[in-house]
Image: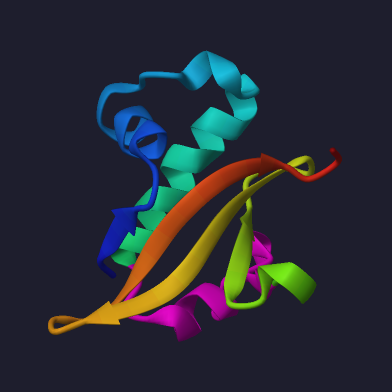
Amino acid sequence: MRFRFAARKLYDLYTQGKGARKYAPEAVEAFFEVMAVIAAVRDERDLYALSGLHYEKLLGARRGEKSLRLTRQWRLIVAMEADREGPFVLVKDIEDYHR
């Protein structure tokens, strides 16, 4: 599935490893693994089917956003968007779930 980054810091992390020290090492490693999964799936249904990712909708002010588990503590925040080419995952942030 196609994806884009909402923030330059995530693009830089993905393409250059830049800014990795802002996150726990295991979260960075999992980020790259989850990004590979996103790139490999056909559509959003495949993300739901992979139970280990805990792909789920966020509530309240975060309506429209979803999260993917990186570790027990860290989550990748995404949203489903679409353009003329079809749907894509908008990667928004890596967040410390316990803060």
Q: Is residue 89 left or right of residue 47?
A: left
Please say if 6 is above or below 71: below
Residue 59 in sight: no
* Range covered by the magenta-colored residues: 41-57
Task: Name which residue lies at 36% across and 51% down.
Answer: 36
Please say if 78 is above or below 29: below
In percent of width and height, residue 22 lies at: 58, 19
Task: Name which residue lies at 48% across and 69% down.
Answer: 79
Q: Is residue 80 left or right of residue 70?
A: left
In percent of width and height, residue 6 lies at: 38, 52
Looking at this view, name the residue that lies furthest to the top.
Answer: 21
Task: Name which residue lies at 84% across and 38% down.
Answer: 99
Viewer-side residue, 63 vs 30: 63
Q: Magenta stretch containing residue 42, yes or no?
A: yes
In percent of width and height, residue 61 lies at: 73, 69
In percent of width and height, residue 30 lies at: 54, 39
Q: For residue 14, what is the image quadrant?
A: top left
Residue 94 in sight: yes
Q: Is residue 58 left or right of residue 17?
A: right
Looking at this view, name the residue that lies furthest to the front.
Answer: 61
Task: Name which residue lies at 31% across and 29% down.
Answer: 12
Q: For residue 19, what is the image quadrant?
A: top left
